[in-house]
Amino acid sequence: MNIRLIFMGKTDDQNIRDLLDDYIRRITRYYHCTIHEIPTLKKSSSMREEEVKSAEADIILSQVTKDDIVVLLDERGKEIRSLDFASFMNQRFLSGMKGLVFIIGGAYGADQRIKNRADHILSLSRMTFPHQLVRLLFTEQLYRALTILRNEPYHHE
């Protein structure tokens, strides 16, 4: 199984970058996992919000295959506990699928076409977090889910 994380924009903060790299290294002990950071659109400051979201969607959707299971992280998505996320991941693994793609859209959120393509839409919280921090929080939760599934002593209830 391949796990891909698609993020709009670069992770500029080196501290966050280092932590992201650490969690990806940990995750890859279990499954192949890669991050695809899509550069911020040039001239996006002169574009309307909907134009930016649409252009970002074009790029993101070009990286998703028809066979991928797509999970969008969106503030309006379903909130679940870490244990439930581990169960969600286990169900995906047992399904025999080849690709699991997690998408974190740009600063304006995800275009409706991405929402329509998503098989699942999840939220980390009802609170608003800095965009780059969401990447780190989600990657940590992905690692946590994998340790829960293996009964490793990382997660405490």
Image (spheres, rainbow, N blue to C red):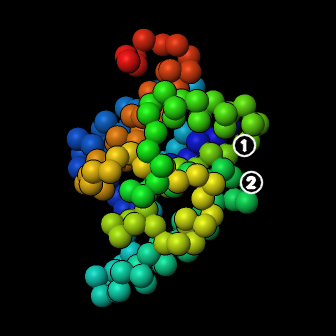
Residue bearing mark 1: 98
- Distance from label 1 to label 2 (Cα)? 8 Å
- The first of marks 1 and 2 along the sequence is 2
Type of amino acid at the residue the image marks with label 1: Lys
Is residue 25 at least partly visible in the picture? no
Question: Which image quarter: residue 65?
Answer: bottom right
Residue bearing mark 2: 67
Residue depicted at 52% across the width and 54% down the height = 121
Question: Which circle marks residue 156 in the picture?
Answer: none
Determine whether 150 is above or below 77 in the image.
Answer: above
Q: x, y percentage for residue 123? A: 42, 49
In the displayed structure, does residue 157 sit left or right of residue 91? left
Tell me, yes or no, whether the two marked residues, 1 and 2, touch with CB atoms within 8 Å. yes
Is residue 66 at least partly visible in the picture? yes
Label 2 secondary element: loop
Which quadrant holds the N terminus?
A: top right
Determine whether 137 is above or below 62 in the image.
Answer: above
Towards the viewer: 47 or 87: 87
Residue depicted at 31% across the width and 44% down the height = 17
In the displayed structure, does residue 36 sit left or right of residue 113? left
Type of amino acid at the residue the image marks with label 2: Asp
Q: x, y percentage for residue 119? A: 63, 54
Residue depicted at 58% across the width and 30% down the height = 87
